[in-house]
Every structure is written in C-alpha cells, then in structure tokens.
Image (cartoon, rainbow, N blue to C red):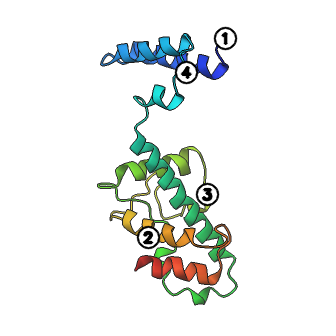
Amino acid sequence: MDLTKKEIFHANQLKILEKLDHGQPETYSEHRKALENNYALPGDWLFDFIYDESRVEQCIEVLDILDMYNAITISFKNLKDKSEIKNLDYLKFRGFDGNSETSYKDITNYVINTLDRYPELRPAEHVYGQYNSYSERLFLYRRMVKKWHLCENKSRLSLEDLRRILIRGAD
C-alpha cells in the first residue's frame, strides 16, 4: 500500500528528528518505521510523544480568549453609545503574565505577531511581540469566556453582552 503525501511528510519529519535528537532517536525511528510500513496506528497515538496534550489545550484556550477579545473589540467599536460601558479596564486585551502564564503569552505572541492574526488586538502601547500583562489574567479570561459562550451571537456582541462579559465577567 502506498503512503499518502501527509504520511510521507510525517515520515520525513521523523527521520529528521532521529538525526537531531540524541536523547530519543529510537523512538522517532520506531514511529517512522511503523508509518512507512503502513501499520494501522491512530494518528493521535503515533504523535503523542511529540505533542504535549496540555500545550494543545493551551493553544485552544488562547485562541478562544483571542476570539472573545476580537469580538469585544469590534463590537465595542460598532457601539453607537460607548458611554454605556463603564468598566473599560477589561475592554482591552492585556496579554498574560510573563512569569506564571509564560506559555500562554508565547502562544499569543506567535498567533498575533508571527501568524499575523487578530490585528485588532495589537494595541500601540504594546512593544511588538510582548503581550506581558505583568499580572495573572488567565483566571479572569476564563470567567469572561464562560460569559461570552452564553452569548447568542459571539461575533457581534450586543451592549448587554458586553456589559455581562466586561462587568460581571470580572466578578
């Protein structure tokens, strides 16, 4: 049975990792051989040793937070009467704490600056590539995301949605 282009790509990546990683080349070699021999291994199982599940979950959580802040930013810009929003402190995305939420900060930097996503969240006061809030924010973002998920239209937030997320989200 012939390998797909994706399987060939992964086999080549594993071959490269075999040469580069002197700590566990046999692991890469075993997985490469299984892939090249078309052993019926689930893809997730085959690459579990490369991808840390917690990092994948962190990426998904960061993207969820960035999606929420993107919706907040655009929805606030489209409000006719901005004076209705009293708590502007949570309106801007501040990033993550560089000491205790480092991987979240790094993922954010990669997504916004390297991948050039979420340009609305790239405020002028941030030094390019930083997104260090200098205080823990993840607990707050998680509460806000829960409120955001309850919104009927997550991309076009109403005034009431913004109030609920920004004011009560901080409670």
Q: Position of residue 74 (x, y in %)?
A: 65, 69
Q: Quadrant of the C terminus?
A: bottom left
**Disc 1 from disc 3: Cα separation:** 43 Å
Which is more N-terminal, label 2 or label 4?
4
Closer to the chain start, of discs 1 and 3, is: 1
Q: Image point 50% across, 32% down: which residue?
A: 44
Residue 128 position (above or below residue 29): below
Identify the residue shown where x is 55% and y is 20%: 40
At 50% from the left edge and 78% from the top edge, which residue is drawn?
166
Mark 2 residue element: helix
Q: Are marks 4 and 1 in contact (CB under 8 Å)?
A: no
Residue type at mark 4: give it.
Answer: His
Q: Nearer the viewer, mark 3 or mark 4?
A: 4
Residue 59 drawn at (x, y percent): 48, 48
Q: What residue would you read off at disc 1? A: 2
Does the image show residue 128? Answer: no
Figure quadrant of residue 37? top right
Label 3, residues with CA under 10 Å away: few <14, some 14-19, many ≥20? few
Report the residue marked by disc 2: 143
Q: Tell me if residue 107 comes above or below residue 75 in the rendering.
A: above
Do residues under tags 3 and 2 come within 8 Å of each other at their CB atoms? no
In the rendered structure, which amino acid carries the disc numbered 2?
A: Arg
Kindly report the distance in space between the C-alpha atoms of the residues bearing marks 4 and 2: 38 Å
**Residue of label 3:** 119
Sequence-earlier tag: 3 or 4: 4
Relative to residue 120, is residue 103 depicted above or below? Answer: above
The 10 Å Cα crowd at callout 1, few under 14, some 14 to 19, many 20 or more, is few
Mark 3 vs mark 2, CA separation in Å: 24 Å
